[in-house]
Image (cartoon, rainbow, N blue to C red):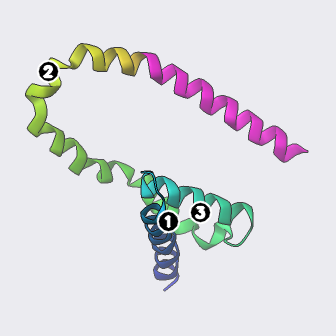
């Protein structure tokens, strides 16, 4: 029964993200808003990590399964992807290290703020 409560909690946060995204005058992915809401609730201790621990770990362990539909969907656009292969690779090779650097900097910043 605990798993059902954890799922209900996670899905209600996702639903709240969808509602907020619909109300905003600009487009933001509802999944990002849901993650921001969940992060805020965790920081404010409105939700404790133990309340979503098992379900969250299940989603993390099985994350690859959630990407299968997206990958299969791209198979319909192989010809289009071939024409943009070089720009796509250039963007991916330039932005990946940038994302690593920014993520590492953000983690270090959060850890230093947490120590204070």
What's the residue at 38%, 55% (across, down)? 62
* Up/down of 101 relative to 14, above or below: above
Residue at horizontal 78 percent and vertical 41 percent from the top: 111
Location of mark 3 (residue): 38
* Disc 1 target residue: 20
| Foreground tag (1 vs 3) | 1
Left or right: 1 as drawn, with respect to 77: right
Instruction: Give the extent of the magenta segment.
Output: 94-116
Determine the CA span between mark 2 and mark 3: 38 Å
Q: Residues within 10 Å of mark 1 (few under 14, many from 20)?
A: some
Could you say which disc has been placed on residue 82 in the image? 2
Q: Secondary structure at mark 1?
A: helix
Q: Residues within 10 Å of mark 3 (few under 14, many from 20)?
A: many
Q: Looking at the image, is mark 1 or mark 2 nearer the viewer?
A: 1
For marks 2 and 3 on the same chain, the one whose residue lies earlier in the sequence = 3
* Residue 76 lies in the magenta stretch: no
Across and down, in percent, residue 108 comes to 74, 34
Q: Is residue 109 left or right of residue 56?
A: right
**Magenta stretch contains residue 99:** yes
Could you give the CA–CA distance between mark 1 and mark 3, rounded to whole angstroms? Answer: 13 Å
Residue 51: image quadrant is bottom right
Q: Main SS type for the magenta part?
A: helix
Pinpoint residue 81: horizontal percent, then vertical percent.
17, 26
Dots 1, 2 in contact, CB < 8 A: no
């Amino acid at each position: 029964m605990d798993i059902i409560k954890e799922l209900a909690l996670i899905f209600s946060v996702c639903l709240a993200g969808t509602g907020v995204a619909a109300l905003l005058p600009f487009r933001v992915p509802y999944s990002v808003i849901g993650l921001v809401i969940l992060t805020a609730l965790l920081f404010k201790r409105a939700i404790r990590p133990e309340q979503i621990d098992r379900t969250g770990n299940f989603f993390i362990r099985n994350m690859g399964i959630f990407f299968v539909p997206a990958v299969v969907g791209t198979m319909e656009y192989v010809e289009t992807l071939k024409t943009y292969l070089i720009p796509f690779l250039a963007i991916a090779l330039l932005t990946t290290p940038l994302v690593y650097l920014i993520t590492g900097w953000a983690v270090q910043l959060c850890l230093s703020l947490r120590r204070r």
